[in-house]
Amino acid sequence: MKKNMGRTDQTVRILIAVIISVLFYNDVISGTLGIVLLVLAGVFLITGALSFCPLYALIGINTCPKDK
C-alpha cells in the first residue's frame, strides 16, 4: 500500500474527525445524521493515520510530495 496523502491532507482529515467526534459526544449533532458523520469521521481518522485513501488511488490523485 503506497502512501498517497500529504501531510496537510492528513492533518485536515484528522482535525475534521476530531471536530465531528466532539460535536457528536456533546450532543450538538445527533440521530441518524450524527451516526453517519461519526462513521465518516472514523474513515477520515483511519485514512489520515495510514496516509492512504482508497478513493484517491481509484481516481489517481496523489497529494504526497515527490521524493527527490
Image (tube, rainbow, N blue to C red):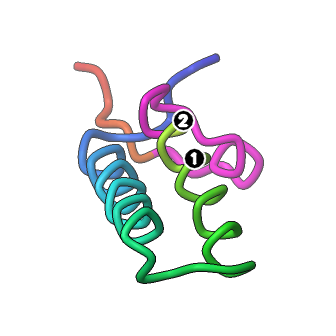
Query: Which residue corresponds to the image point at 47% horizontal and 42% vertical from the top-left?
Result: 45
Residue 40 magenta: no
Between 66 and 36, the one lying in front of the other is 36
Which residue is label 2 attached to? Answer: 46
Between 13 and 61, the one lying in front of the other is 13
Figure quadrant of the C terminus: top left
- Badge 1 element: helix
The CA distance from mark 1 to mark 2 is 6 Å
Where, by quadrant of the figure, is residue 18 drawn? bottom left
Q: Are marks 1 and 2 in contact (CB under 8 Å)?
A: yes
Query: Which residue corresponds to the image point at 66% horizontal and 56% vertical from the top-left?
Result: 39
Residue 53 magenta: yes
- Residue 22 in percent (x, y) is at 34, 62
- Badge 2 element: helix
- Residue 37 in percent (x, y) is at 60, 69
Position of 36 compared to 65: left or right? right
Which amino acid type is shown beneath numbered disc 1?
A: Gly
| Dominant secondary structure, magenta | helix
Position of 31 compared to 18: left or right? right
In this rendering, which labeled residue sits more in front, label 1 or label 2? 1
Instruction: Report the disc number at residue 42.
Output: 1
Which amino acid type is shown beneath numbered disc 2?
A: Ile
Graded by Cα atoms within 10 Å as few (under 14), some (14 to 19) or many (20 or more), the crowding at tag 2 reads some
Marker count (numbered): 2
- Residue 62 in percent (x, y) is at 49, 44
Q: Is residue 36 above or below residue 8?
A: below
Where, by quadrant of the figure, is residue 38 drawn? bottom right
Q: From which residue to which does the magenta span run?
A: 48-62
Instruction: Report the disc number at residue 61.
Output: none
